[in-house]
Amino acid sequence: MKCKECGADLRWESDFDFENVGYKGKGIVSYYNCDSCDLLHESVIDFTINLQILRIVEVEEEEC
Ligand SMILES: [Zn+2]
C-alpha cells in the first residue's frame, strides 16, 4: 500500500480484530506507517459489508 500523502510505500505495524479496537461487526484493522512523512495509516477491512478503506490516522499530541 502507498502513503496517501506522499505515495511512498507503507511499512506494516500491527493488526487488530475489530473487537480489540471497539469497532462493530467483524473485520481487521491494520496499521501502517510511512517512513517518508511519518504518517500513521489505518487500513480497515470490514468482513460484514465487504469493505476496505485506508485512511490517515490523526495522532493527537500528548500534553505534558
Ligand atoms: Zn508519506
Image (cartoon, rainbow, N blue to C red):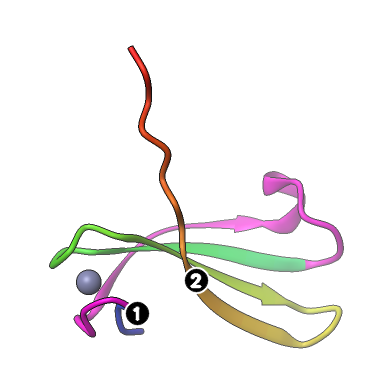
**Is label 2's Cβ within 8 Å of ligand 1?**
no
Residue 37 occupies which quadrant of the picture?
Answer: bottom left
Range shown magenta: 5-26
Residue 31 occupies which quadrant of the picture?
Answer: bottom left
- In reply to whether residue 53 is colored magenta, the answer given is no
**Which residue carries the number 2 mark?**
55
Instruction: Find residue 44 and report its horizontal and vertical position in percent.
Output: 61, 71
As rendered, which of 3 and 60 lies closer to the eye? 60
How would you rate the neighbour count of disc 2 (Cα within 10 Å): few for under 14, some for 14-19, many for 20 or more? few
| Quadrant assignment for ligand 1 | bottom left
Assess whether mark 1 and mark 2 are in contact (beta carbons under 8 angstroms).
Answer: yes
Query: On the picture, is 34 further left or further right than 55?
Result: left
| Picture layout, residue 63 above or below residue 19 | above
**Which residue carries the number 1 mark?**
4
Query: On the picture, is 25 further left or further right than 38?
Result: right
Query: Which residue corresponds to the image point at 30% horizontal and 78% vertical from the top-left?
Result: 3
Q: Identity of the amino acid at label 2? A: Arg
| Picture layout, residue 12 above or below residue 22 | below
How would you rate the neighbour count of disc 1 (Cα within 10 Å): few for under 14, some for 14-19, many for 20 or more? some
Instruction: Find residue 1 and report its horizontal and vertical position in percent.
Output: 36, 84
Answer with mark 2 or mark 1, whichever residue precedes in sequence.
1
Q: Identity of the amino acid at label 1? A: Lys
